[in-house]
Image (spheres, rainbow, N blue to C red):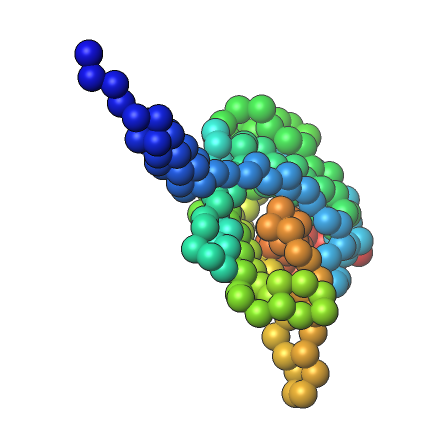
Amino acid sequence: MRLIPDIVVNATRATVMVALMVITGCRSEVSLHIHYIPGIVPGSENIFRAAKIAVFPATGALASGKIDAGKTYAADGGVKTATVTNAGKIFTLAIVSALAGAGLEPLPAESESPDSTPPEDVDFILTYELEQFDVVKRFGSSQTVHGQYFTMHAAVRAKFVLKNRRGKVLYSGEIVGIEDEPPAPSGNEVFLPLEAEPGESLSVAMSRTAGLLMIDPKFRIAFVAR
């Protein structure tokens, strides 16, 4: 029997370990915690008189299950995938919160699609498709007094349809909320990042989408102003 030298065995083991580390690094991911931030869009709160609005669950390929919600790129070339589970449910909670904050009475619906005959006490029906829900963070090689330099872009986009109880379309439009870090320079003034974590940046973008819907003039005209 031919014996294999220890140095060869150790070298082989080291190669396998490096390969496993590379594979693991390529597949590494982090689950993001996303939450609604009330009042992030100025003028989006306490603007309507009370009206009952049925809010149906978000639809679209991004609405259910675990989705790829972006990437974080390290300066050395490493990539980490950001994931979000049940983005549609999270987004629906944000819309319900924004509607309530604006003065309306949102009633979350349990079914996936609106019935032809809505409940008697419902004045409006809101449906929406989640079209984009992601954040990308890129680290640079330079260092500042605040740490390693990075840029980050988060975006949440959805298409909304608002109907009255008779089924007439009162509003149809696409809203996108964006969060960029660091904020764009103003003149000679350079701003520091307000958010450093992808989950917080995506939370800001989502909250902006919900808030921007409230102040969309074509959406607002359907309701009685406070």
Measuring 67% from the left and 32% from the top, which residue is drawn there? 107
Where on the picture, by quarter, is residue 94?
top right
State the image coordinates of residue 87 (x, y, percent, origin top left).
Answer: 54, 37
Measuring 66% from the left and 87% from the top, which residue is drawn there? 187
Please indicate whether residue 85 sits to the left or right of residue 16 in the image: right
Q: How many marks?
A: 0
Q: Nearer the viewer, residue 216 or 147?
A: 147
Please indicate whether residue 226 sits to the left or right of residue 154 in the image: right
Q: Nearer the viewer, residue 74 or 103?
A: 74
What is the quadrant of the C terminus in the image?
bottom right
Measuring 30% from the left and 26% from the top, which residue is drawn there? 5
Please indicate whether residue 45 sits to the left or right of residue 153 in the image: right
Q: Residue furthest left?
A: 1
Measuring 74% from the left and 63% from the top, which residue is drawn there? 42
State the image coordinates of residue 108 (x, y, percent, origin top left).
Answer: 64, 31
State the image coordinates of residue 26 (x, y, percent, origin top left).
Answer: 41, 42
Q: Residue furthest top?
A: 1
Can residue 172 be seen here? no
